[in-house]
Amino acid sequence: MNPSSSSVDIEKIIDRRSFMLGMMTAFGECVAAEAKKCAFSPPFYPEDYYVLKTEAERIAAELSIFLWLEENEEIQDSHKVMWWVMYKFPEILDEYQDIRAKGFNPAYEFDQFSTLLSYGCAFGENSGNVLPRIRKKTDTMDTVTRILFQAGDWPLPPGSRKK
């Protein structure tokens, strides 16, 4: 089927809540597996908070990470957005709050947060010399398992591999 001839309005197919929670699960997994020091949830309108809160907290608990709500008090109400800072270790939230205390906001000065978000690390100078180290082992599949599989279908049982 030619996508340009489709009469389906893709914007009506994508569920915003599921999309945002899916992004949180993916970025949260990166934080839990220590591939990122921290991540931000997608930005959302203040009225979305209670629609997202319970499931966002559940995802964070399953991933053994923490959420901190950025309310962005300095953004005018007519343009207000919020997000969660997702982190695994308390000093990372401290680092985020230190950058914020200097007057920077990711909505306006995103580049000030790029190192904290672990951007540029995979191809950074001397990245080939980095030795992987996990500070605290975490199972990153709990949320995926809960949402995608029937009870007992994941992890795959021993003997399920074809010989």
Image (cartoon, rainbow, N blue to C red):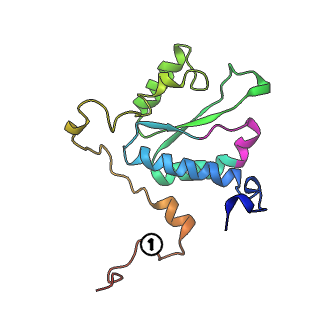
Which quarter of the rendering shows the N terminus?
bottom right
Q: Is residue 46 magenta?
A: yes
- The quarter of the picture where residue 105 lies is top right
Does residue 3 lie above or below 35 as drawn?
below
Q: What residue do we see at 37% from left, 79% from top?
A: 157
Q: Nearer the viewer, residue 115 or 33?
A: 115
Q: Which residue is most to the bottom?
A: 163
Q: Which residues are magenta?
A: 42-51
Label 1: which secondary element: loop
Q: Position of residue 67 (x, y in %)?
A: 54, 39
Q: Position of residue 163 (x, y in %)?
A: 28, 86
- List the residue tagged with mark 1: 154
- The quarter of the picture where residue 92 lies is top left
Q: Is residue 11 left or right of residue 130?
A: right
Q: Position of residue 73 (x, y in %)?
A: 68, 22
Q: Nearer the viewer, residue 64 or 70?
A: 70
Q: Position of residue 56 (x, y in %)?
A: 60, 48
Q: What residue do we see at 38% from left, 48% from top?
A: 33
- The quarter of the picture where residue 125 lies is top left
> Dot 1, how many residues are within 10 Å of its Cα: few (below 14), some (14-19), or many (20+)?
some
Q: Is residue 92 left or right of residue 15?
A: left
